Amino acid sequence: MKKTFKLTHPKIKVPRLVEAIKHEVKKYIKRERGKTLPGNVDFWDFECRFGLDQTSSEAIHLSEINKYISQAEEKQLESFYLEILAKPGHRSKKPTK
């Protein structure tokens, strides 16, 4: 998902838009995690980027998406760019002590 979300709408209030965006992101992540895994892959990992636009976006962790969306609402931004790309993930073993 590579998308620029707008936080302005003539009829819909900003808090409702933010809820809809968070729901859309959650739905996308759930759909991607439900896809069948290729061989020798343990789980679906995600590369996430957030910013005002595609060129100024920076890498963030998947668990921080809602926090950044809420910050965009607090800063009263007109729009923001969010990129979430699924990639194969491999579990690493814990080091023994």
Image (tube, rainbow, N blue to C red):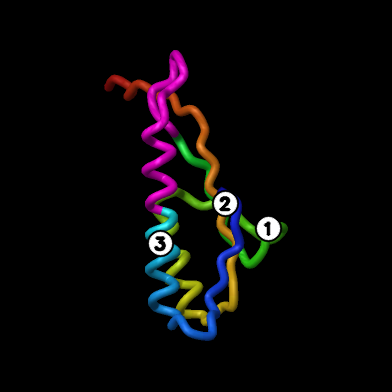
Q: Residue at x 55, y 48 (%)?
A: 1
Q: Which of marks 3 and 2 is nearer the N terminus?
A: 3
Rate crowding at label 2 as few (under 14), some (14 to 19) or many (20 or more) other CA atoms within 10 Å: many
Provide the secondary structure element on which disc 1 rests: loop
**65 and 14: which one is in front?**
14
- Kindly identify the amino acid type of the residue bearing the numbered disc 1: Gln
* Alpha-carbon span between mark 2 and mark 1: 8 Å
**38 and 49: which one is in front?**
38
Verify CB contact (< 8 Å) between mark 2 and mark 1.
yes
* Alpha-carbon span between mark 3 and mark 1: 19 Å
* Alpha-carbon span between mark 3 and mark 2: 13 Å
- Quarter of the image with the C terminus in it: top left
Rate crowding at label 1 as few (under 14), some (14 to 19) or many (20 or more) other CA atoms within 10 Å: some
Provide the secondary structure element on which disc 2 rests: strand
Q: Picture coordinates of residue 7 (x, y %)?
A: 53, 75
Q: What stretch is highlighted in magenta?
A: 26-44
Tell me if 97 is positioned left or right of 90 in this view: left
Provide the secondary structure element on which disc 3 rests: helix
Disc 3 target residue? 22
Disc 1 target residue? 54
